[in-house]
Image (cartoon, grey):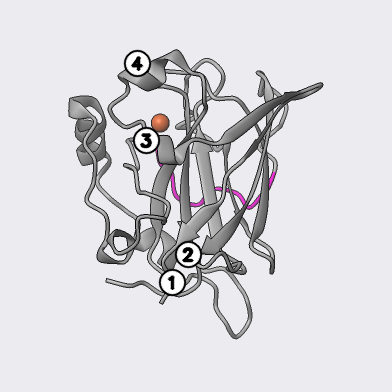
Amino acid sequence: MLKRHPIDEKNQLLTRRNFLAVSFVSPAALKLAALGGLVALSPTPACADDDDVTPRNIEGPFYKPRSPRRASLLEKGVKGTKLLLTGRVLATNRSPIARAMLDFWQADSDGVYDNDGYRLRGHQFADDSGRYSLETVVPGPYFPRTPHIHVKVQAPNQPILTTQLFLPGEARNRFDGLFKPALLMAVRDTESGKEATFDFVFATR
Ligand SMILES: [Fe+2]
């Protein structure tokens, strides 16, 4: 079922309640899914029509609604290798999709999620060219997962895509049943840490 984009088109105000209402799944069920077996969800019909679209991945047990709106997750107390992730939100014909919402959450460098506050959690909107930019740190692994960044992306008037991004060269990628090569970021080392790119591709109608 298609859900409307959470931006009120009249006043451009975000209505996160709508966004979150359509994305809620029982935490207990998610924990079971995450711990019990690295369960892959079936793609929506819209995503199954085209092999080039960004694949889904499970939400996992640690999603929290109402993350702060921010493009940098760097703040006091966040340690680890800095990671600058940039990319675009595109249609399958490679045209940009403006103003998609991207909601990121991840473990810290020790593989720990902040489930009390909002450390390493934040949402933002892509610009009119579909570009987004996230400042964060490289996530650490936690059993049984390889390092990954969770994200929900919702292009205007499209279903929410819930997925995860992975880093190349991680030994644990081979053993994580949720790992998908199509969700690998392109990563390079820089003087200050790492830079990564990833484009989200939607089969828009
Ligand atoms: Fe996770």
User: Mark 1 highlights which residue?
Assistant: 204
Nearer the observer: mark 2 or 1; the answer is 2
Q: Position of residue 47 (x, y in %)?
A: 33, 60
Q: Out of 24 and 159, give the one closest to the viewer.
A: 159
- Residue 33, position in %: x, y? 21, 35
Q: Residues within 10 Å of mark 1 (few under 14, many from 20)?
A: some
Q: Amino acid at mark 3?
A: Lys
* Quadrant in the picture for the C terminus: bottom left
Please tell me which residue is depicted at 42% across the width and 41% down the height of the picture. 182
- The span picked out in magenta is 62-71
Name the N-terminal-most of marks 3 and 2.
2
Residue 63 location, quadrant: top left
Q: Is residue 119 visible?
A: no
Residue 143 is labelled as 4
Residue under pointer 3: 180
Give the vertical position of 179 relative to 1 (above or below). Answer: above
